[in-house]
Amino acid sequence: MISVDEALARVLALASPPRLETVALAEAQGRALLEPAVSRLTQPPFDASAMDGYALRSADLGDPLEVIGASAAGHPWDGMPRPGTAIRIFTGAPVPAGYDHVELQENIARDGDRITVTTRSRGSNIRPRGNDFAEGDRMAPGCRLTAARIGLLAAMNVAHVSVARRPRVAILAGGDELVPPGTDPAPGQIISSNDLAIAALVRDAGGEPLILPLARDTEASLRAGFAAAEGADLLVTIGGASVGDHDLIGRIAADHGVEQAFYKVALRPGKPLMAGRMGKAAMLGLPGNPVSAITCAILFMQPLIRAMLGLEAVPPLQQARLTCDLPAEGPRQHYLRSRLTPGDGLPGIAPFDDQDSARLALMAEADALLVRPPSDPPRRAGDLMAFIPLPH
Ligand SMILES: Nc1nc2c(c(=O)[nH]1)N[C@H]1C(S)=C(S)[C@@H](COP(=O)(O)OP(=O)(O)OC[C@H]3O[C@@H](n4cnc5c(N)ncnc54)[C@H](O)[C@@H]3O)O[C@H]1N2
Ligand code: MOO
């Protein structure tokens, strides 16, 4: 058995380098920008009013002024400026040359075409041309395309960006007991849940899942599943990874030329985890117990997908304070399904009493996976502990 860190390093070494594609901004969310994006515009493109009010000359502020025109967003005023005058103006409209101050309409007394400033605001209420960004400004590659960055690129008139193609992830769940959701299970059968949960985790990490038909516990069925994964960047199998008579994944993988990077990790839940290279693709064999499958997918599959996308593979662990005592740990690194509570500064964390790796209902309720290293000594309430937040 190898350590979790060693297993993670070997999994990440299976990542194919990001494959560049050019996509419309609407397709880019959550992906890494892989080539610099260069602004084609200056923003704002003109000195713009920040308020609804009147543009005037600050030298004229004490005097009654004559309103000689209007400038609205999309409808600039193109008259000749003169001392002693003001221009009705609206937020986002170009401030006509010759005027250097916008006064809020709340601070104006108006009588016909005459206005007087009753209160003077402190600033000019003008956003100078280019105060947000300028033509030629670059967004550096490597950053994740968040909502604000997508908005910024759109404002820069960059309609397409270079990102990594979403890794195609084939998901192969197997077992004679499994039938799809929405069907009536016969005696001895259960509903297959892992494939859908893992597909959701693939999508969360930025990959494109393809759920293959459920495999039976026969070599022929599993071989057909492996063949159907042709063309995927990653094949994720679920179940059949352990030592039972029907656990065939290791053998089928070897027959398909999988060069095994490892099998078995000092990890709880998820000891029977395997990974390897299968031609140009990577292969990850997750254990069948639903909590083990989800935990291993969070620990290994999602980092692998993020690495293929050029994103930060492993988000940093977070810290919380234990709210209960815990006994010493065994030799495997343990990820305990836990509840977070608001704390003074750091949150509080308490693992559930039951850590059965088949109890999906508890996994669904958990806020976090508390991380306990191998042979962690007994812990006391108040101790600082690391955790992985679970999506809500
Ligand atoms: N003698 C030993 N037995 C087991 C060991 C061991 O070391 N020695 N390891 C245990 C551990 S730990 C795990 S985890 C499981 C994993 O085994 P497999 O990967 O071979 O998984 P299966 O046997 O196929 O299934 C386990 C369990 O999960 C259910 N399952 C499987 N696939 C799905 C699915 N798609 N949706 C819902 N549920 C699924 C399956 O019905 C089983 O109940 O092995 C232990 N045994
Ligand atoms: O390690 Mo297994 O993954 O507990 O259920």
Image (cartoon, rainbow, N blue to C red):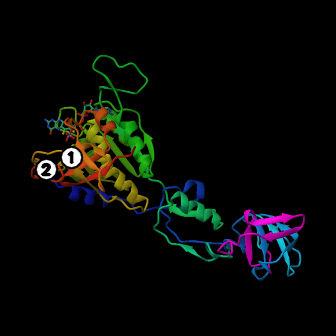
Q: Residues within 10 Å of mark 1 (few under 14, many from 20)?
A: some
Q: Secondary structure at mark 1?
A: loop
When the figure is inspected, residue 299 is found, relative to residue 351, above or below; the finding is below
Disc 1: which residue: 323
Q: Nearer the viewer, residue 270 or 357?
A: 357
The stretch in magenta equals 96-125
Please name the amino acid that badge 1 sits on. Answer: Thr
The earlier-in-sequence mark between 2 and 1 is: 1
Is residue 274 within the magenta segment?
A: no
Q: Quadrant of residue 201?
A: top left
Nearer the observer, 186 or 257? 186
Question: Where residue 334 appears, x then y in whole percent?
Answer: 19, 47
Image quarter where ligand 2 lies: top left
Q: Position of residue 104 (x, y in %)?
A: 72, 66
Residue nearest the observer in this picture, 353 or 165? 353
The percent position of residue 44, horizontal first and vertical second, equals 68, 71
Q: Which residue is mark 2?
A: 380
Disc 2 marks which amino acid?
Answer: Arg
